Amino acid sequence: MDCIFCKIAAGEIPSERVFEDELTLAFRDIQPQAPSHVLVIPKTHLASLDGLEDPGLAGALLTAAARVARDEGLDGGWRLIANTGSDGGQEVDHLHLHVLGGRPLGRMLSS
Ligand code: 5GP
Ligand code: ZN
């Protein structure tokens, strides 16, 4: 399958890995939007959050994101983003969670 994140998971495309376990891989975004910008992906292909049905995998992804945030030292806070589908602004069709932090991120939703 011609999927860039599958190739990163397979080690066919280089990436700066910061964490991995049996189900997940975390690596630095190539175009960081914050001092810390890490992508957390499932090692097996899943197009987006839309197709996520496995609570075990969901937990593994969230746990990996929290672990990455701690390891990055994001004590002041951080943000998790999962762009999903075209309206959601998703550009790479392999489920990924963005972990962003290291600067004030502002408010995304007005109240
Ligand atoms: P999306 O817009 O799909 O939520 O985010 C895709 C993210 O993947 C973008 O932030 C983009 O910079 C990142 N990205 C795209 N190609 C590569 C790559 O080859 N390596 C890494 N490390 N990040 C990538
Ligand atoms: Zn993939």
Image (tube, rainbow, N blue to C red):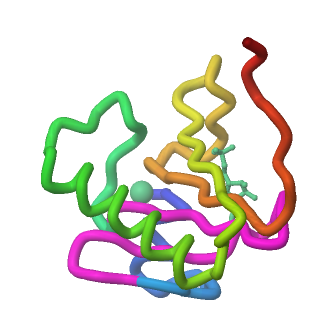
Is 31 magenta? The answer is yes
Residue appearing at x 59%, y 47% in the figure: 92
Q: Nearer the viewer, residue 74 or 39?
A: 74
Is residue 48 shown left or right of residue 30?
Answer: left
How many numbered discs? 0
Residue appearing at x 69%, y 59% in the figure: 100
Q: Position of residue 19 (x, y in %)?
A: 45, 84
Is 83 magenta? The answer is no
Looking at this view, name the residue that lies furthest to the front.
Answer: 76
Q: Position of residue 24 (x, y in %)?
A: 33, 70
Residue 55: quadrant of the picture: top left
Q: Which residues are magenta?
A: 20-42
Is residue 37 among the parts visible in the rendering? yes
Split into 4 quadrants, where in the image is the C terminus? top right
Is residue 109 shown left or right of residue 81?
Answer: right
Q: Position of residue 98 (x, y in %)?
A: 60, 54
Residue 61: quadrant of the picture: bottom left
